Amino acid sequence: MALALAELAIEKLLYTPNAEETRLLLADLPRAGGSVPRLAAWLGLAAPVLSDWVYGKRSPRTPGRRLVWLAWSLVFEPNNLVEWLARMPRRCRPRSKRSSQGAGVRATGN
């Protein structure tokens, strides 16, 4: 299963996997040694919510899909995670403290 996931376009996964890709990632995570309740606790989710995602009863929204991708990447591709995150477009990266210090402050002509 991990090989099939590795063949998915990393650029697409960086932004947000679709519902089917998310289910594939979720199906792969228990190989890391966890049950659905343990995985739910690790992700900060209620076990029934994660169970619904795993079995396709519900699909996670964008933040949930990104969380699943990040968890999968931390478990199965930790060495590549830094490289993948470096390839994120600038608009998706959090602003540094330096660039956000002046945000919202307007210079006056005095």
Image (tube, helix red, strand yellow):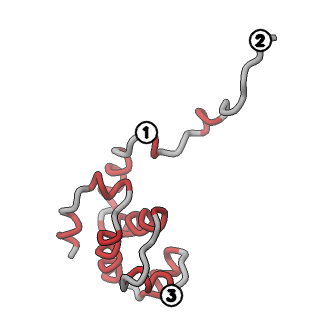
Residue shown at 42% from the left, 75% from the top: 59
Q: Which residue is mark 1?
A: 90
10 Å crowding of disc 1: few (<14), some (14-19), many (20+): few
Q: Secondary structure at mark 2?
A: loop
Amino acid type of the residue tagged 1 in the rendering: Arg
Asked if marks 2 and 1 touch (Cβ < 8 Å), the reply is no
Measure how far apart labels 3 and 1 are at the Cα level: 35 Å
The vertical placement of 52 against 102, above or below, is: below
Residue 50: x, y in percent?
Answer: 46, 81
- Quarter of the image with the C terminus is top right
Residue shown at 38% from the left, 50% from the top: 85
- Quarter of the image with the N terminus is bottom left
Q: Which residue is mark 3?
A: 48
Q: Which residue is mark 2?
A: 109
Residue shown at 30% from the left, 78% from the top: 28
Amino acid type of the residue tagged 3 in the rendering: Pro
Q: Secondary structure at mark 1?
A: helix
Residue 103: x, y in percent?
Answer: 66, 33
Q: Residue furthest right?
A: 110
Amino acid type of the residue tagged 2 in the rendering: Gly
